[in-house]
Image (cartoon, grey):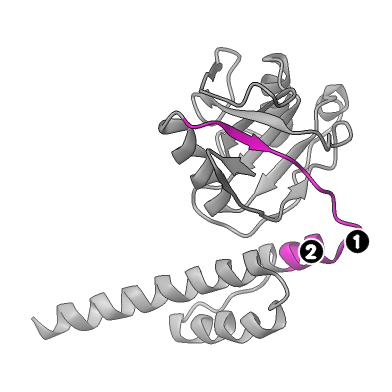
Amino acid sequence: MQVGSEVRSYEFLTSNFGGRLSTRPLTVTSVAPLDGCTNSSTIVRSNNNPSSYGQAVLVKRGGCTFDVKSQVIESLGAHLMIVVDLEDSALQRLGGKQPLAGYVGMPSIYVPYPCGEQILRGLDNGLGVTVTLTPSSDTVGSTNWINLAFASWQEEEDERLSQYEGLVQKYISSNDIVAWLRRRVDEIRSRKFKSITTDEL
């Protein structure tokens, strides 16, 4: 992904419906409202790179099912829907139900929170945003993310903290998964620190 002159790579998961992913650069815009759930949704234009091909549209997770979002976004002329969970959940497969999903020809991808945040920040600042997709040659990455998305986490924060920290080494080959786990660790430590600070007052 390129935002202005900055280039970064992120992992992504694809939808289980829609067409094949394009490997050509796509301009990126967003939609209003950002959940992309209504037929009154409109593309938010930005200063995109004119040399790129087609259009990818960023939407946030929630508000409706993925197949409904896809149908709305495809009707706006998009070649790709990019979904981000602003609550920073683990990535999972974008699923759709028949018959609606069968009417969608456009593929979709689910990206990590920092990727979506960077896209939104770039669009807000009027920077050109493009994305070029490189499909993986295996399913290891998607399997790892799905395992995290459906993992059973401990209710007690200290135990959950140990779970997250213990998984860092297991997934060390994935920068995005390790970053996600460390954000969970930082959240818990931040809450614990605030609790200690409040108790001392």
Seen at 57% across and 66% down, the residue is 180
Query: What residue type is disc 1 on?
Result: Asp
| Residue 182 is inside the magenta segment | no
Q: Is residue 134 magenta?
A: yes
State if disc 1 and disc 2 touch (CB < 8 Å). yes
The N terminus - image quarter? top right
**In which quarter of the view is residue 132 placed?**
top right
Q: Where's residue 176, x and y in %?
A: 63, 64
Q: CA distance from mark 2 to mark 1?
A: 8 Å
- Residue under numbered circle 2: 141
Q: Which residues are magenta?
A: 127-147
Mark 2, Cα crowd under 10 Å, few <14 / some 14-19 / many 20+, is some
Asked whether 127 or 174 is in front, the reply is 127
Q: Quadrant of the C terminus?
A: bottom left
Q: Nearer the viewer, residue 134 or 33?
A: 134
Q: Is residue 121 above or below residue 32?
A: below
Q: Depth check: 68 or 58 in front?
A: 58
Residue that label 1 marks = 138
Tell me the tag on residue 2: none
Residue 4 vertical position relative to residue 13 in the rendered view, above or below: above
- Give the quarter of the image for residue 102: top right
Q: Label 2 amino acid?
A: Gly
Q: Secondary structure at mark 1?
A: loop
Count the labels in the image.
2
Q: Is residue 144 left or right of residue 99?
A: left
Q: Is residue 192 left or right of residue 121?
A: left
